[in-house]
Amino acid sequence: MTTTASAGGTLPAHIGVIMDGNRRWARAAGMARVSAGHRAGADHLADLLRWLTVRGIHHASVYVLSADNIRKRDADEVAHLFRLVEELVPAWLGRSDEWQLHIAGDLGLLPASCAAALTQAVRATEGRRSHLTLAIGYDPKQSLVDAVRTLLADGEEPEGDALVQAIDARLPGGPIKDIDLVIRTSGERRISGFFPWQSQHAEIVFSDKMWPAFTESDLDAALAEYARRRAVH
């Protein structure tokens, strides 16, 4: 699903962002601790939400931390990320009434205080116009398994397109599940399990910028590339 930009180009209705490169950005900037990069990256998400609102894009899915990241990364680094999420996510969402929060992932992998803060933010933002899905503690295969299990528990047996729609409806996120454009920063050329069901038809734009250095102009360049590709389809 897409929308038409006022300037005549086609805008994605739903944008996905893999915010990569926080640690490398901190090292390149000469910072002694990579935690400074994570804070800069977390703060930068608020900028992205503002840019999307201005452009009339009301659905965003953002990769924060996969289940594998939680299990395999340094424990102190992961703990710092959890503290940032607990502190900053409710603060961003509390500064405006624009974005409704959705969570994709296993909150059981998070510290209790972080999980509680996110759960409260989900409740506090219900009914807002725009939809932000944070993938945290996320495992793409488990997400699909959970959706199918829920479908079976509901006693439904749809087939064909109805089956696809039934699974869509049980996946986490806002009312528009399909992602039109995925942006990955840091120069990496892979998707890393980013919402594979939802992004199967998405255009993918890779940026060489580290996430904290990704600018509003970089976003516009990605949107322009999306519009160019869709114009020739």
Image (cartoon, rainbow, N blue to C red):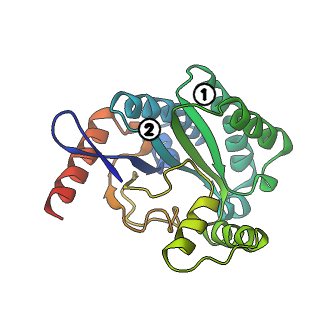
- Residue at the spot 66% in from the left edge and 48% down from the top edge: 103
- The residue closer to the viewer here, 206 or 96, is 96
- The residue closer to the viewer here, 178 or 18, is 178
The residue that label 1 is drawn on is 93
Numbered tag placed on residue 139 in the rendering: none
Q: Dot 2: within a 10 Å radius of its alpha carbon, few (fewer than 14), some, or many (20 or more) residues?
A: many
**Lower sequence index among marks 2 and 1:** 2
**Mark 1, secondary structure of its residue:** helix
Name the image quarter holding the N terminus. bottom left
Q: Position of residue 180 (x, y in %)?
A: 37, 55
Numbered tag placed on residue 58 in the rendering: 2
Q: Residue 139 lies in what quarter of the image? A: bottom right
Q: Residue 143 lies in what quarter of the image? A: bottom right
Q: Is residue 105 left or right of residue 183?
A: right
- The residue closer to the viewer here, 147 or 53, is 147
Q: Residue 38 lies in what quarter of the image? A: top right
- Name above or below for residue 89 compared with residue 13: above
Q: Position of residue 95 (x, y in %)?
A: 58, 19
Q: Position of residue 154 (x, y in %)?
A: 76, 68
Name the image quarter holding the C terminus. bottom left
Residue type indicated by callout 2: His
- Residue at the spot 63% in from the left edge and 70% down from the top edge: 144
Q: Residue furthest top?
A: 95
Q: Nearer the viewer, mark 2 or mark 1?
A: 2
Q: Position of residue 176 (x, y in %)?
A: 48, 51
**Mark 2, secondary structure of its residue:** loop
Q: Is residue 190 left or right of residue 215?
A: right
- Residue at the spot 70% in from the left edge and 73% down from the top edge: 156
Q: How many angstroms separate mark 2 from mark 1 (CA)?
A: 14 Å
Residue type indicated by callout 1: Leu
Q: Is residue 145 left or right of residue 189?
A: right
Q: Residue furthest right?
A: 112
